[in-house]
Image (cartoon, rainbow, N blue to C red):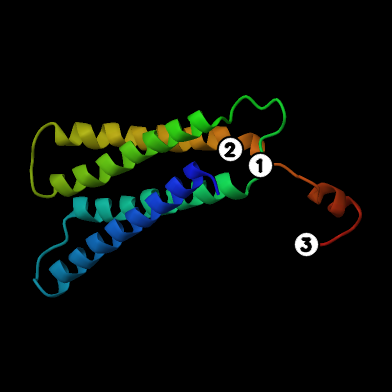
Amino acid sequence: MHTIVRRFIKTGGVFLLVGLALGAWLLLSRELLGRGVHPHLVSAHTHALLSGFGLFLIFGVALWLFPKPPKGDLRYTPGRARLAYWILLAGTSVRVAMEVLRSAVHGAWIPWAIVASGFLQVAGASFVLWILWPRIRAVGSHLREASGERF
């Protein structure tokens, strides 16, 4: 397993723990402390689990299990995969942190940071998909299908 694959998967695990901790706080706050649930905390919880855990885990496993890039593929390089990782990590980390901060502080710059980090998330995820796209192809299965094998 390559370093970038481990990095994606382990980062997904960290975001899972962050998302679960936020969810536990939301549950405790609502059920035992009688407080309303702040929508920005719900957003932080959702982004930690779906964007953080979900995307990082999916992209890490895809980089690990998908076929090697075809010969002549200029999209995938380890450097580009690392760059996509850092863009997605920056976007998701800042998004979660700013959503939590926004639930307690009302600085005029925080909404701008949330929007900018959201665009970083879109850019990072799009970059990973662009890198992976040529790797989503048949490698032998099309021959088995042509011979009548059923899956």
For the question of whether residue 55 can be seen, the reply is no
Task: Determine whether, in the image, residue 120 is placed left or right of residue 139.
Answer: left
Amino acid on which disc 1 is placed:
Ile
Image coordinates for residue 134, horizontal then vertical, percent: 65, 34
Q: Residue at x 24, y 62 (%)?
A: 21
Label 2, label 1: how far apart the Cα atoms are: 7 Å
Image coordinates for residue 63, horizontal then vertical, percent: 56, 44
For the question of whether residue 85 can be seen, the reply is yes
Upstream in the sequence, badge 2 or badge 3?
A: 2
Image coordinates for residue 143, horizontal then vertical, percent: 86, 48
Label 2 packing within 10 angstroms: few (<14), some (14-19), many (20+): many
Residue 122 is marked as none
Q: Residue at x 29, y 63 (%)?
A: 20
Q: Nearer the viewer, residue 85 or 124?
A: 85
Q: Is residue 21 above or below residue 68?
A: below
Upstream in the sequence, badge 3 or badge 1?
A: 1
Which is closer to the viewer, label 2 or label 3?
2
Query: What residue is pinned by disc 2?
Result: 132
SS of the residue under disc 3 = loop
Query: What residue is pinned by disc 1?
Result: 136
The residue positioned farthest toward the right in the image shown: 147
Label 2, label 3: how far apart the Cα atoms are: 24 Å
Quick check: marks 2 and 1 in contact, CB under 8 Å? yes
Residue 119, quarter of picture = top left
Amino acid on which disc 3 is placed:
Phe
Label 3 packing within 10 angstroms: few (<14), some (14-19), many (20+): few
Residue 151 is marked as 3
Residue 75, quarter of picture = top right
Q: Is residue 126 above or below residue 27?
A: above
Query: Quadrant where the C terminus lies?
Result: bottom right
